Structure formats: C-alpha cells, structure tokens
Image (cartoon, rainbow, N blue to C red):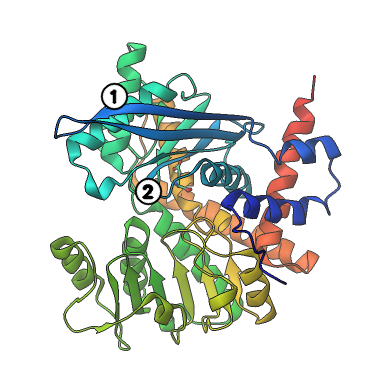
Amino acid sequence: MEEPRREESAYDVALRQYDAVAEKLDIDPGIREMLRHPEFALEVAFPVKMDDGSVKVFKGYRVVHNTARGPGKGGIRYHPDVTFEEVKALSMWMTWKCAVVGIPYGGAKGGVTCNPLEMSKGEKERLTRRFTVEISNVIGPYTDIPGPDMFTDAQVMAWIMDTYSTQKGKFVPGVVTGKPIPLGGSLGRTPATARGLVICIREAAKELGLPLDSLRIAVQGYGNVGAHLASILEGYGCKIVGVTDIGGGCFCDAGLDPCALTAQLLETGSIDGTPGTDCLTNDELFELDCDVLVPAAVGNQITKANAGKIKAKIIAEGANGPTTPEADEILADRGVMVIPDILANAGGVTVSYFEWVQNLMNFYWTEEEIAERLERIMTESFQAVLSTAKEKGTRLREAAYNLAILRVAEAMKLRGVC
Ligand code: GLU
C-alpha cells in the first residue's frame, strides 16, 4: 500500500482505522457516521504570566469524542507538538480503549501546546490553573474526567482538582484521576499502564509459545511507562537489551539494569551514557535482535520506512498511535503480532476508573485489590480480542476495533436518537 503524499494527520489515521472496520460491521449507517465525529470540541487561547514578568499566550484543547457508554475520559498532555487534530484523534482512541476493556466511559482528550521542559514549576502551575478554568464548564465527575498523559503528572492533576474544587466551593476529587494518594489518588495508578502492558506481553508470549523469562525486550521511551515496564519485566527474568529516550539510547546484550538507567536519568535528564552500556540510536533500537518491541514514546514511530526491518515477534504499543496503517500491513505480512494501543496501554485508564469509583464511594482499596482487578480486566480483554481475531481471521487491532465499535454502537442504539 502506498503511503499518502500529503502528511496525514493523526485524526486521518484514526478515521482510516475506524472506517476500515466499521464499514464491515452491521451497524446503523447514521450511528456509523456519528462515530466519525467528536460530540464536542473546545479550543481555547489563554494568557499565563511567566517568571520574567512577560505574558505568554497558550492554546489548549479539550475534545469529547463520545459519551454513549459513560462520561468522557482521557488525559491532558503538555507538548510542543499538540494540535487540535492530534487531540481529536486521541479522544477517539480513548472511546475505543474504554470500550475494549469494558469500563463505563466514553472517550475524551485534552492538551496544551507548550514545552513543559522549558517551564518552571510556577509557570506550569499557573498554566494548569488557567487552563482548568477555561475548560471548567466542560469537565466534571459525571461529564468529562481528565487524567494524566505526556508530561502531565500527579502534581498537575492535584492543581486541576484544586482549581475545579475551589471554583465549585466543594471538594470534588472525582473530577480528575491520577492525583497524588493523599488527595484521593489510587494506589497502583502510577505503574498501571506498564502493568497492563506486561499482562498483554505475558499473554501474547504464551500464545506464541515464548517463555516469559527468556524474552529480549527493546523499549522506546523511558518515562512513566517505559521505566516501570523495564523494571517489572527485568523482575520476571526478561533481558532489557535496548532503551532509547529523547537524549539518546543504551544497548547491552546481556541486559540493561533499570536501576542504573533511572539513576542516569535523574542525574542527567536522559538515560544516554549509562555506565557499562553501548550507545544506541532509535533506528538501531527498532532493528534490534529482540522478541518484544515496546514503543512507549510519541506517535508515528513505526512507519513504512522501518517496519520491514523490525525483528521483534511482538510489538506492544505503550504509546498512542505509534504505528501507521501502512506499517501495520507490513508487520502483519511478516507475521509480527502487534498488540494495539487501545488494548496494550489501557491499564492506565483502567486504574483511573478504579480511582474515580473510590472517589465517588469515598472508600479506598488496597494495592492488592487494585492489582487483582487490573489483572482480571486486562487478561480477559486480551483473550477476548485474541479470540475475536482468530474467529474473524483478522489482526489484533481490527479485532479490538471490532469489539469496541460494536459496544459503543449498541449503547448509542439503546439510548436512541431524537
Ligand atoms: N493518558 C492515558 C491514556 O492515554 C490515561 C488517561 C486517563 O487515565 O484518563 O490512556
């Protein structure tokens, strides 16, 4: 398949993935068309006072793709590349993600175009509080619930909760998830995305007859997802042979030490140059002799240009939208098992759901309860996607979309249109 000349936006890709499956399903044409559009989209521009006294204007977005199965749910990202089209795509992917793991949410996403790495803590706080005010008529515990995403963490979620609660004149912890534990955050939320990925990798390896403790792993990105993933898998006896981040990369055939990578990251801001490792570029990472490749950084990383060179037998998409549709076809032809983002990285939003439930009940679970519930949801969801793929003779991505679209379409049909 030819890659289109005009640069495709993430939303074009999201639509292509949706259309390819939806057109084969027996759903009402009106519902099928509605699902191609977000229900609601807000674009805001707002001023922030910077530390040097100047005022800078930022653009932000909150998009609710669908609320048929429950309130909108999805993270807020801070990144220089954030665009309206990207947030729209991410909101649609959240709809499928929540549906595929069966949690009672629709899909939403938000973002602010900014470079958080160049901002002080005070500037980030002022930006977050002002953005929260701008979207405060949209978000709410029963309407649209933000959570963390790229470069937003528990502290950012705490500022959102505080700003919203102050405005409403009451404590509203359920307006946002991913909060610090003392403010109603859930135990196990921080490593949840990595834990979900590990469960998917374990199930995929079982399916392919590969023993978990002999897997060689390559990871792109050493943020919250990549770092937790590396240490959990290393604990299971896997070898983390290569890791890259924005500053560079490390290779060690005998296996990298996640503690050493984290120490280097904390000291220098990148894992690059970790003692006892060889340098590794991103291109080299994708071509490594390994069993599992985990893209856990930005989107659009596995393309027609590198898909043919990937040696991994399993790709587990920690990031959202890391693989282009053309690359997907090449990988399928070569027999690579791709665990799609809407399933592979759903552990994060699943524990966000647990956090929200605990906030609404004001009753809190132990870490063991969280881990057990996550284990059950992720294992059952993986197996449901796998058996749909086998039954329909499709890839895992198409099977996941198939299940998700049918669930959302059914909810829309039951609610009715008037
Ligand atoms: N940002 C995460 C995702 O893409 C989680 C969002 C949330 O917890 O709401 O799934």
Mark before the other along the chain sequence, 1 or 2: 2
Give the labeled residue for mark 2: 80
Q: Residue furthest top?
A: 169
Q: Is residue 284 left or right of residue 378?
A: left
Is residue 113 something that shows in the picture?
yes
Callout 1 amino acid: Asp
Q: Position of residue 398 (x, y in %)?
A: 70, 60
Q: Ligand 1 closer than 8 Å to the CB at disc 2?
A: no
In the rendered view, tell whether residue 173 sits above or below residue 315: above
Q: Position of residue 224 (x, y in %)?
A: 33, 56
Q: Nearer the viewer, mark 1 or mark 2?
A: 2
Find the distance from the CA under tag 1 to the CA under tag 2: 25 Å
Neighbor class of circle 1 (other Cα within 10 Å; few <14, some 14-19, many 20+) is many
Helix, strand or loop at label 2? It is loop
Neighbor class of circle 2 (other Cα within 10 Å; few <14, some 14-19, many 20+) is few
Callout 2 amino acid: Pro
Is residue 180 something that shows in the picture?
no
Give the labeled residue for mark 1: 162
Task: Please report the residue visible at 72 percent of the width from the left and 46 percent of the height from the top.
Answer: 405
